Amino acid sequence: MSERLRICLLLAAVVLVYGNSLRNEFTQDDGLYIEANRAVTEPTLGRLFGANESTGIYRPVTFITFALNHQFGGLHPWGYHLVNLLLHAGVCWLLYLVLQAILGNSPPAKLAALIAAWLFALHPIHTEAVTAAVGRSEPLAAVLLLTAWLLHLRDREIPALTCYALALLSKESAV
């Protein structure tokens, strides 16, 4: 099986399992973090990078992505869920690449990386992070962390540190 086909099947599985989230409305904390958050609905540099008056947490990169969603689609949940789905697909793809870089290019190593990426992609523990709009901070931080790791493995230290810093500004768990 070709490398391209492996990745396409992995990403198709993510869409198949989590694609139904595109029909979701806003739920639970989405109102606080998105709908009532002026950093999202009326963004300014001060609101995005200052103390958040709505939530009390500091996640400027996450709030910037929410503000961009709001700019392009208002408060229609579909776009927020689409970005989360794409981020989860990106995490799965990057995890596969990082594992492959660590484990090597032998057929057993490639298979192990692929199996691990599939398990990660389809594991139900990711449901909240992918299907709740406010869960975005998790896959966003993961995309940035895995990108930083991959860049580090390729001796691209400044871009790696930049991605790591952005991950820290996405969610505290990036530490």
Image (cartoon, rainbow, N blue to C red):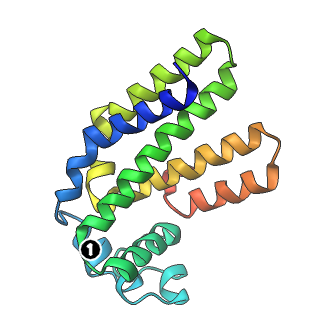
For residue 43, side relative to residue 49 (left or right): left
Q: Quadrant of residue 168?
A: bottom right
| Left or right position of 76 against 110 | left
Up the image or down, 99 lies above or below 51; here it is above
Q: Within the image, what quadrant is residue 108 found in? A: top right
Residue placed at 26% from the left, 47% from the top?
A: 19
Residue at (44%, 87%) from the top-left corner? 43
Task: Name the foreground residue: 170 vs 130.
Answer: 130
Q: Is residue 61 left or right of residue 104?
A: left
- Residue at image mark 1: 32
In terms of depth relative to the viewer, which is nearer, 89 or 139?
89
Q: Quadrant of residue 23?
A: bottom left
Q: Residue at x 61, y 14 (%)?
A: 109
Coordinates of residue 72 in the picture (x, y in percent): 38, 79
Residue 47 pos. (x, y %): 47, 86
Q: Is residue 39 above or below residue 10?
A: below
Query: As shown in the figure, which amino acid type bears the numbered disc 1?
Result: Leu
**Mark 1 crowd level (few <14, some 14–19, many ≥20, 10 Å Cα):** some
- Name the residue furthest top: 108
Residue 57 in picture, x, y percent from top left:
43, 70
Residue 104 image point, x, y percent: 69, 19
Question: Element at badge 1?
Answer: helix
**Residue at the spot 67% in from the left edge and 12% down from the top edge:** 106
State how many labels appear. Answer: 1
